[in-house]
Amino acid sequence: MDTITQLTGWEFAALAIAACLVGFSKTAVSGANTVSLAVFAAVLPARASTGVLLPILIAGDVLAVLTYRRHAHWPTLWRLFPAVAAGVVVGTLFLTWADDQAVRMSIGAILLLMAGVTVWRRRGAEREEEPEAVTGRAGRIKARSYGVLGGFTTMVANAGGPVMSMYLLSAGFRKLGFLGTSAFFFLIVNASKVPFSAGLGLIDAGSLLLDAVLVLFVVPGALIGRWAVERIDQRLFEQLVIAATVVGGLQLLLR
């Protein structure tokens, strides 16, 4: 695991910008941190990058909870957590045997999948006037499906954001409810992943030293996100995020 002293100036700058984007994504555009994921996996060993990024994501989650805590919808959270826990266990089992190349390829494939999911979600939102049903048997099946996929992707690649974004948007959440519910969701899920990541050796003294420096860049990103959330051109930004995610995914697959 590379420590901060082993990074070049350009590598550290890239990680700092990616950490800032984590903060921005947590308070403005959930799922935008897939770009950060691609940067971390490109600069650091792919497997180790998931352990370095996790505490930074948790710092962003804490800031998001402090900002939007009054807008969380807990019934939705309780519906998702059991399936997410199953997905996290499956992801942990995958990481026990996957080497760096397998993890890098998986992250690249997941990024491309999430980009496709986001495009599909946006086009579906344009076609449909009403949100999809999220109650009853169909709603439970939908919550379990998204929960398992979200748990797996967040454990393997810290890339559960687009999956949960699609679920929450299809459930008809308005902006503040969306941000408040996703803030608590990812704080709880990411915190629960720490023992698994530490047990797999993904979090160690070297990674925490790097985190201690990079977490400082999360705060300005979160503040910018809070300022921009009512002003940002969401459609254009999502298009840029999708494009950057595709480029990042292809870079990891072809590396």
Image (cartoon, rainbow, N blue to C red):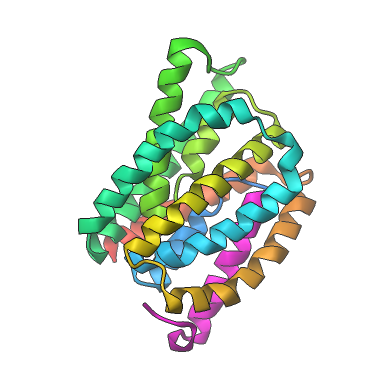
For the view shown, which residue lies furthest in the bottom direction? 5
The image shows residue 77, relative to residue 153, as above or below, that is: above
Residue at 72%, 54% in the rendered image: 225
- At which x and y percent is residue 24? 66, 56
Q: Quadrant of the N terminus?
A: bottom left
Instruction: Inspect this view and state whether residue 148 appears.
Output: yes
Judging depth in this view, the residue of 190 and 28 nearest the camera is 190
Task: Tell me what residue is drawn at x 58 percent, y 23 percent.
Answer: 171
Q: Residue furthest top?
A: 136
Q: Nearer the viewer, residue 32 or 4?
A: 4
Furthest-left residue in this view: 97
Q: Is residue 167 above or below residue 200?
A: above
* 45 with respect to 97 (left or right): right
Which range of residues does the magenta coloring cover? 1-27
Between 177 and 234, the one lying in front of the other is 177
Majority secondary structure of magenta residues:
helix
Of residue 161 and residue 240, the one placed in the foreground of this image is 161
The count of marks equals 0
In the rendered image, residue 47, in percent from the top left (x then y), is placed at 33, 64
Q: From the viewer's perspective, is 215 left or right of 83?
A: right
Q: In the shown orientation, is residue 164 left or right of residue 28?
A: left
The x and y percentages for residue 255 are 29, 66
Residue 246, position in %: x, y? 42, 51
Residue at 71%, 44% (x, y): give it: 233
The answer to whether 213 is drawn above or below residue 156 in the figure is below
Q: Is residue 253 above or below residue 74?
A: below
Query: In this rendering, would 141 be left or right of 126?
Result: left
Residue 121 visible? The answer is no
Residue 129: say if magenta.
no
